[in-house]
Image (cartoon, rainbow, N blue to C red):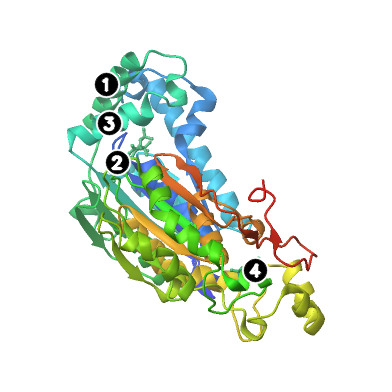
Amino acid sequence: MVTYQKANGKGVTVDHTRICVVMVGLPARGKSLIAQKVVRYLAWLSIPAKAFNVGSYRRNDTPNPTADFFDTGNKEGERLRHAAAEAAVADMMKWFDSGEGVIAVLDATNSTKDRRRWVHQRCEANHIETLYVESKCDNEDIIMSNILEVKTTSPDYKGQDPEIAARDFRNRIRNYEKVYQTIDEDEKDLTYVKLINVGRQVVVNQIRDYLQSRVVYYLMNLHIKPRSIWLSRHGESEFNLLGRIGGDADLSARGDLYARELPAVVDRSVGDDRQLTIWTSTLSRTIQTARFLANSPKGYDKLEWKALDELDSGVCDGLTYAEIEAQYPEDFRARDDDKYNYRYRGGESYRDVVIRLEPIIMELERSENIIIVTHQAVLRCIYAYYMNVPQEKSPWMEVPLHTVIKLTPRAYGTLEERFKANIPAVSTFREKGSVAKHQESKESSL
Ligand code: ATP
Ligand code: F6P
């Protein structure tokens, strides 16, 4: 519970901190990308978050503006832009008032001190904290590639020649530069973080609470170097063949074949001479699966993480789903009713796994090319982060054995490719309500 003192002296109690993350910066500085990533990260951690993009409100009235629309000398342009900011802030307040909102991201340039004060006052009046995130970048190459990568395909320039679009966007930036005020000494009472040249330098001011510091820490770890993340389950294990969950079994003969084939599958999916780092869990089946990859002539480094161990099924460890239903019928049903939140007796829930995976996600954000050899439930959670899969769906996703999933983060979304090894395996996927023993996979039996 957080109690705020109103101007009239009366207290207002809100049962959680509410934060408006206010993006600041010239166009093409990665603000929208940062806003979307923060929202995805928080949603993955079950913290209700939403981005309010002022550009999309502006597009309701002015879908295809040219650069002069953004000239502060253009009075009508100024009026419409302010109206768009008003509309976004009004919707944001409604969202907070509905009780569901915890962190909003106000995605706009918010490039003048006046605009930032206005946002601050609106938030303060509604007992919402503000955290300003300024992205500054003077690296011409980055700015140009941002313009070419995302701006020429923006809805603002739909159907236009990319060269003309890029030129107009440059002029738009010039118009913003005329009035842009970086956050400075006058604003030292504000809570802010400045990310300079994609986090090469970070300035942090007046962080007030845990939630703010979580967001700031996440922002400090982001980079935009091109890279991919490869995900694979371990090869088929002896327990998979028996339909038993958990345990620390060895690979089956087919699982071992997959381990031997893995370097070739990975080579096929990498396509160049990039250096990968291998992460496994501490369980035998992932270590055995990665052993040929680790010893490949490429000389990949290898790291074992306890945090990548399979979801702990507590008292059910080593049982089949049919045995669980017979011995713990209520638990079996409860898990089907809410698989994300159900915690095995003496074990874990998917929610617990996400919490222990947070440092893994943070390290992945900091890193470049990583191949993770892990387990079904853990892989679902990591995949859900990158692909924004909601909690009702993620525990039920089918993740086949003997398949490498390559994820490549792009400006707006993640590209997914799958590379199958031609080695059959059982399917360990269990549908809601079913107690079927792990089945020979339909695809692999083809
Ligand atoms: P606008 O004000 O026009 O909406 P924007 O600042 O929101 O622009 P984005 O649309 O997010 O810009 O730009 C995305 C591009 O910015 C991507 O190509 C991404 O790689 C790059 N980018 C991401 N983070 C940063 C950063 N901290 N500094 C500079 N560029 C970045
Ligand atoms: O069956 C393989 C396995 O990795 C088990 O060890 C684990 O308990 C299970 O999958 C997780 O999947 P689900 O959450 O669908 O039971």
Foreground disc of the pair 3, 4: 4
Q: Residue at x 38, y 13 (%)?
A: 161
| Residue 241 drawn above or below residue 399 | below
Please say whether residue 346 is visible from this viewpoint: yes
Amino acid type at image mark 3: Ser
The residues tagged by marks 3 and 2 sit, at their Cα atoms, a distance apart of 22 Å
Circle number at residue 33? none
Q: Which residue is mark 4?
A: 241
Q: Residue at x 30, y 62 (%)?
A: 295
* Image location (x, y in percent) of residue 254: 55, 61
Foreground disc of the pair 3, 2: 2
Amino acid type at image mark 1: Asn
Mark 3, ligand 1, within 8 Å: the answer is yes
Amino acid type at image mark 4: Leu
Circle number at residue 145? 3
> How many numbered marks, from 0 up?
4
Residue 304 placement, left or right of 333 = left
The residues tagged by marks 3 and 1 sit, at their Cα atoms, a distance apart of 16 Å
Residue 334 placement, left or right of 36 = right
* Image location (x, y in percent) of residue 398: 63, 55
Q: Residues within 10 Å of mark 2 (few under 14, many from 20)?
A: few
| Residue 420 drawn above or below residue 392 | above
Mark 2–mark 1 contact, CB under 8 Å?
Answer: no
- Residue 14, by quadrant, is bottom right
Q: Which residue is mark 2?
A: 272
The residues tagged by marks 1 and 4 sit, at their Cα atoms, a distance apart of 63 Å
- Give ligand 1's quarter of the image: top left
Q: Residues within 10 Å of mark 4 (few under 14, many from 20)?
A: some
The earlier-in-sequence mark between 3 and 4 is 3
